[in-house]
Image: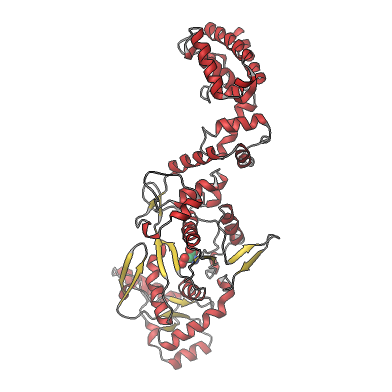
Amino acid sequence: MQIRTRIAPSPTGFVHIGTLHTALFNYFFTRQNGGKFVIRIEDTDRERLVEGAVENLLESLAVFGIENDEGPFIDSNGVIDEKGDFGPYTQSARLDIYKPYVQQLVLQGDAYYCFCTRERLDEMRKAQQAIKQTPKYDRACCKLDNAEVKARIDAGEAHVVRMKVPEGETTFTDLIRGTIKINNKEIDDQVILKSDGFPTYHLAVVVDDFLMQITHIIRGEEWLPSAPKHVILYKMLGFELPKFAHVPLLLNPDKTKLSKRQGDVAVEDYVKRGYLPDALINFVGTLGFNPSADKEIFTRTELTKLFDLSKVNKSGAVMNMEKLDWMNREYMRLLSIDELAEAARSFVQADVESEPVRRALVVERERVHRLDELQEAIDPYLIEPAYDPSMLVWKKADSADAKLQLDGIRGFIQALDDATIESVEKIEAEARAYIDANELQNGNVLWPMRVALSGHEKSASPFEFLWALGKGAALQRIDKAIGMLNK
Ligand code: GLU
């Protein structure tokens, strides 16, 4: 059997980090099994549609190299097109497909027309809530006879169609959660066709997953309460059940449900803030799934190989942002210099082709967590720093000593040969040898040297600065420092 999976996002704006989470799990599972990965656009909720959301979704997934085998894609002219044999892949283009299934359910007595007004439904809900009952449709319209239903429809009265949840229990297996059993008394007679002629999510998702031959429905835990309704509809329609896997919710560090606010959860914002796509794949792709207890860094290829639905946790997965920061730095470290320059290009206003900028980037990638911190980090290399000369003085020394040491450092830098100045390690070894040979103290020498080169109390080491600046610029900065101490 060919494995077929899907994600079925609603185009309601930005891409939620939870969507990336389920997309990755679907993607790993599908690629591991040589299956087909489908994107289907669920746009039946017409009030929540956002212009450009589908483009944004496809572009965001492309950043992570998540390519669908079927469904919408952006063609070479930048226009949305569709591929695959099971289209259309957008629900609003499938309205005629759903209608016969609604008819079938009505004819079977598994669904009924409902003419209740919003006011009546509101009143009913309030009354039920007042006596602490879970709100549920009271089936008033289920009792209408066929003639009356026909007359009211013919008269143009607004109506919906509801599924008639049977008595008994609904049981199904979830690949992550095991057997799920629910008493049908707890399930509302869900609307399946709305008054605007659009199906609701519940009907459309069942019909589409069946017609698109989806074998595994891997989606977020927030859809678990809907699954029994779907299972009932599958049975009513005589469809074979797919396999379900509800992946854990993503949580804030305080274990509350991840917010819906765009700034915190939009995938595109994470990219804009300078998290590398590979780091995000590693981080998000291991939320609720830990391939190995003693390793944290996994490439997409490794995750595709190791992913195992049966090892996905049931409990919510906490998003530890410190871990993401750490991981992102690890990924920045893995980049070649060309890749680093390329990644930094849109984050820094500096010529990333130039040697001084590249060297500054190489040093500072060890000290920042995100690409958007690089500009501030490399500024001290590119702009001659202004600082108070008192900063040059080591806490256990005085200004005369600082000047004396800087004179010495000047000679030391001047004397370094080309091979040494090309290596941070060699510069450091030479500097330590110089300190030892002259019986000096580390602090007295390295503090003023570092401040003179960086202009900052805190910065990368003097060896790194010297390497990044090069001899000429370094000597200029030392001279400037000596000049300031002379005043
Ligand atoms: N349209 C739903 C969403 O927005 C899809 C849920 C599902 O995967 O069944 O996430």
Camera sees residue 414: yes
Q: Residue furthest bottom?
A: 147
Among the 4 quarters of the image, the one containing residue 468:
top right
Report x, y in % for residue 288: 39, 53
Q: Residue at x 37, y 87 (%)?
A: 143
Does residue 196 lie above or below 465 as drawn? below
Observer-nearest of 141 and 412: 412
Report x, y in % for residue 52: 62, 60
Among the 4 quarters of the image, the one containing residue 173:
bottom left
Does residue 388 lie above or below 333 as drawn? above
Label total for image: 0
Among the 4 quarters of the image, the one containing residue 163:
bottom left
Q: Residue at x 56, y 80 (%)?
A: 96
Quarter of the picture containing the C terminus is: top right
- Is 255 left, or right, of 326 in this rendering? left
Q: Residue at x 52, y 73 (%)?
A: 212
- Is 96 left, or right, of 81 in this rendering? left
Q: Residue at x 46, y 86 (%)?
A: 104
Observer-nearest of 458 and 340: 340
Does residue 358 lie above or below 194 as drawn? above
- Is 353 left, or right, of 296 in this rendering? right
Observer-nearest of 116 and 372: 372
Report x, y in % for residue 331: 52, 41
